[in-house]
Structure formats: structure tokens, C-alpha cells
Image (tube, rainbow, N blue to C red):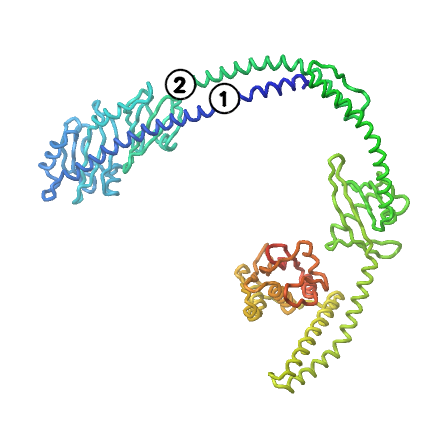
Amino acid sequence: MTLLNRLLIIVFGAGLIPIVPAGVFLFYFQSRAKDDIESLQRNVSQMGALMMEREARDLSRRFERMWDTDASYVSHKGLERALKNNPEFLYLAFTGADGREALSGGAPEIKRYLGYLDLAGDTLFLKASRDGRAALGRFEMVFDMPLCRLVYPIGGGYYAFAVVNLRDLFEKLRSQRLGATGGLLLTDAEGNALPLSGAFEEFDGAEVRDILGRGQSFEITGKKGAYIGAAARVRGLDLFVIALEDRAEAFSGVNRITWLMAFFLLAVATVFYFSALLFTRRLGVPVEALMAGAARVSGGEFRLPVDEETEFAELSALLRAFNFMMREVDRYHGIQVEKVLEEKQKLELLVSLIHDAIILCDLRGELLYANAAAKALLGGGDVVPGENEALRRRITGLIRKKSLSRSGVVELEAGGDKKFYRASIQTLLAKTQDPAVFMVLRDITLERKMQAMKEEFFHSVAHDLRAPLLTMQGYIKLLEKEFQPEARQAGYVRNVKDSSDRLFKLLENILDISRMEAGQLKPDLKPVNAGEFFASAAESFRPLFEEKGVALAIETAGAGGKAFSADSSLLRRVIENLVSNALKFTPRGGKVTASVRAENGGLVFTVADTGPGIPPDQLEAVFERYKQLKPGGEEGGFGLGLAISRKIVELHGGRIWAESVPGGKFSVQFPA
């Protein structure tokens, strides 16, 4: 699209802004007009339904007052009196509970038309006998008279059946017209309909039932055209009054106004278009020159200025400022290039001095950059950026090892020795370049060796201290018997006993971890009922929870009595560790929820509390040995409980993890 066309669209679009509210108003006018037409249809149908309701109520009241309670209902005398007092009753009959005629009278033509009366299967009779009140319906034109049928239960097991002339009501309803062709339609629920007014087409029973199913307001397409209308139900009866009008006739006035307004808006837009076209032709030349200059600047060409002479003083000033800007940008561009080169040299020197291996590659593993430590790790002097399949395989192998390592530590062979590296990988997404992978590997071999030496020292010390500590505990028990419980010396002995117990527990935990890592501890797997086992392990802490004022909820319904194979003594240590940790970190007034549920054929044990929770960056660290979060106001442990728990769970083929949710949450999952 050319600049002239763009300017034309911009100026023309700005000129069309006042037309937008006019278009919105036109749309609003059409919507309101449609709503008003639909409202008129509803009001007319509801008014007709109200008139029909009044007529039905009047007929019901007549039947209620028609019979003398002291006389027999079913008699020629009562029949003649009812026909005489109600001239609109063209026919009246009494039937028994089976619907068969017992006595009848009225106009001979109607009697011949109806024949012998048997209402056993008539819907009006069935409705009246079921509801115990009058049922009105079955509208039809007989001998040019609008008739309806009425069934009324009169007691004693008898029913009155009347054919009522609705000429007076129909005259009132015929006065309700909608335009030249619209009017009202009276129908029952079965689709027996009578047109009251209007000149629309005739609808059969199925079409009428379809209209009633469309809701209060509707639009339909008949054999002669489209109609708009509304249906209103006569309250208390299965009767409906339908207002119908030819759709084109109903919207004719709205459509005429819409076309007039659309023509006016089109005329305004045409005049403004040609005015905008004339203006943009004069404005386009200097703007195109300015755009051409901007394109040269974006391509790095700053020396060719734009023509500053135009018919518009403001544009001439803008072009002069643009030429000045190009000269200044050209000057600063040269300065910045020198600074970038200088900073690049400093950065390369700094990265080359870092002892950690730094690797930058693309998503396929092709090397983009490697510092000296990374080159030595990848193979020496032949490590250069570019396509190298062997080098690409080594890099992708490092990335794969990092993804498979839970702790982020990878093991590599270097010069016949094993070395350990803590790897960190991040994907770099740049707007101007393809995505790249940035990897840093820090050599932690020495740290691993020192950790191993420390563990070996701890295990040796723990093993050597275990025997004298057992002897010490024996003497402490003897000392306990020497003093009365309330004596001051007994308190000293208890403090010594508690300290020795904690020290013995620490030594046992250290030795347990050592046996697990050496493969000397094998679980004795036996069938265990998950719900009973879990409830027993957690319930043992109930007195401690009550003493601290923390609520304990145990939920085992989700396990459904499921059994699984486990070493109950080892697994009990896991549950007790998790529950005791939750108690330790939950303040008074809080709550701990311990639950077990079946999931995907396996089991999931969960312990959640309302304590301070676990920081997201500590979710894995809490399972490391001697690593612990200090609960506020309480003495911490030795940081071995969760490490032992993870080892026990892994021995059972399961997994344990922590979640950063409001409060603390630990879960243990055993597969199917």
C-alpha cells in the first residue's frame, strides 16, 4: 500500500469518526424498535389472554351457582333451567364418571353435530376428572359460530358438558388488530386454533404446537411469508392467545428510516472522501520523502539528507530537524561501536578467567561459545564453534544427564577419574536471534570428597560412641531409682537422660543412613492394611497434639480398606517423622490433617499443616542430611528425619515430596 493511500485512509478515517456515533445510534434505534414491536406483540397477546381468563372465570362461577344443592343435579328440570338462564350454552349434557351421556339438551343442530356423547377418551374430560375443576378448550367454528367445549365436575360422580357460544368474546378479541394483516389466534395445548382477527394464513395443529414451543416471543416462517409474534397463556387453563403479524409489515417503518439514514451517511462519507483525497495528494510528497529518509537511517545510511522544501512550513521544520538528527546519530553511532567493541573485549577476558565451565549452544546442541574451562571439559583444542557432530553429541549428552539428575549433579569421566559437576541450564529467548541454551557447570568433586570424608568420620564416631552411651544410659537408669521423683537431683538426672536419649537417637539415625547407603538394610515386605496402619501411626501422637493445643484430623476413607506390601516398622518411622514435624511447625490453635487415599491403583499418604509453610527454594533442600528449617520458638532436631524418610520410601519403590502451599504439605506415593 502506497503512502498516499495510507494518508488517505488516515484522514478519511478521522473524518468518519462523527459517523460512528450515527451508526451506533442507528443500530440502537433498530434494536429499540424491534424491542418495541415485540413488546407490542406481547401486550396484545397478554390482553387477549386476560380477556379469555375473565370469560373462563365467569363461566366457572356460573356453573358454581347454577345447581341447587338441595335438588338433584341430573334432571330434566335442572337441565332446562340451566339452558334457559344461560342462552350462550347451545348444548348441555350430564355424564357419569365413565364419560357416557346420561341426559342432554340444547340446539338440535348441535345435538346432531355431536351425536351420542361419550367422553371417556376426551382430553378435556380427563383433565377435569384429574384436577377436579372446569376444563375449557376445543375451539372450532360450527355454523359460523365460534364455539368451545367446557367440562365441569358437579359432584356426586357426575359431570356437566357444555358447548358455549363465544360470539361476544370473539367480537371483543377481533377488535385487537396488528397492522393491516396481523391479529390474534386462540388455541389450546393440542393445537386446536381459531383465528380471531387478521388476515394471516391458516396453521394446522402441528404448526401451532411448534409456535407454542418457541417461547413468549418468536419469529416463524409460514407458507406465505415470515411472521413475528408472541404467545400468552390463559392463567389456570391450557389455553393460549397468539398475536401474529407479517414481519415485513411490522418492520416497514423501521426499515424506511434505516435506509434513509444509511443513504445520508453514505452521502456524507462520499463528500468527505474526495475532500480527503485532495488534501492527502498535497501532503503525500513530503511525507514520502521523510519515510524514505527513515528507511535509509534504519539501513545504516546517515549521510544522504532529505529535501527540506515543502508547501507546509511545519513539515519543512520537521524535515530540517530530521536531517540534523541524522547527522548527530551518525556521530554517536561511531562512538557507540567503539564502546561496544571495548566492552566485548572486557567481557571475553572476564569469562575466560572464570573456573566454571560456560557453554552456549543452540537448541540442536551446536556450540556457539565455550570458555577455557568448558573447552577443557569438552575435549581440548578441537572445541570450536560451528558444525561438529561429535561435539554436538557430547553437549546433548551433558544436557540429557542434567535432565535425568534430580539433584542437578552430573558425573563425568576425566582422565580416568570420576568428577562431579553441579549443572545449571537456562534457555535464552532473544527477539533478534534464535533461542539458545546457556549451561554452567561447577566442579564440586572436592566438595563431594570432603562430604564423603565427613560422613565416614560421623559413621565411625557414631559407631564408637554407641557402646559407651548404652553403658551411660544404664547408669542413668540406676541413678533415677536413687532419688524421689520430686527431688531436685531427680530433675538433674532427667535432664541428663533426655540429652543422652537425643544423642542416642542421632547416632541411630546416622547408622541407619549408613546401612541404607551400603545396601545392608532390606525391607521385610508383608501385606499391610493402609487405613488401619496409617491411623495407628498418626493416632499415637494424639496426646502431644492435645497438650500443645493443635487439632489433628485423620482421614482414611479414601483408602477404601486397600492393602499393600511394606515393612510396617520402617514405614511407620516415615509417618511418625512427617506427623511430628507437622506438630513441631504448627502454632497453637492450628490444625494438622493426615490422610490416605487410593490413586491410579496405588496409595498416597499426605500430611498437611497450617504452619508457616516451606519456601519454594527449599522444597528439595529439606530432604538433605543435617538440613532443617527452624520452627519459631521451638528446639530443632538434627536434620536427619526427612533424609531417612526419603531413603525408606525409595527402598519401597515410592517417592516423597514437599509442596509450597499455604502451610506445609508432604506426600508419599506408592505405585500400583
**Badge 2 is on which residue?**
253
**Which residue is identified by label 1?**
22
Q: Does residue 3 show up?
A: yes
CA neighbours of label 1 inside 10 A, class few (<14), some (14 to 19), many (20+): some
Quadrant for the C terminus in the image: bottom right
Which of the 4 image quadrants contains residue 444?
Answer: bottom right
The residue furthest bottom is: 482
- Side of 507 where 415 appears, left or right: right
Q: Is residue 2 above or below residue 42?
A: above
Q: Is residue 565 visible?
A: no
| Image disc number at residue 126 | none
Q: Position of residue 639 (x, y in %)?
A: 70, 65
Residue 196 horizontal/vertical position (percent): 27, 24
Marker count (numbered): 2
Q: Nearer the viewer, residue 412 or 299?
A: 299
Q: Secondary structure at mark 2?
A: helix
Residue 140, image quadrant: top left
Q: Residues within 10 Å of mark 2 (few under 14, many from 20)?
A: few
Nearer to us of marks 1 and 2 is 1
Residue 599 position by quadrant:
bottom right
Residue 288 percent across, percent down from the top left: 71, 18
Is 430 left, or right, of 103 in this rendering? Answer: right
Give the camera-side residue of 498 and 473: 498
Q: Residue at x 55, y 16 (%)?
A: 269
Which amino acid type is marked by label 1? Answer: Ala
Q: Nearer the viewer, residue 408 or 259?
A: 259
Q: Secondary structure at mark 1?
A: helix
Q: Is 657 rendered above or below residue 537?
A: above
Q: Amino acid at mark 2?
A: Gly
**Left-right relation of 302 to 502:** right
Question: As drawn, is 587 to the left or to the right of 301?
Answer: left
Q: Quadrant of the N terminus?
A: top right
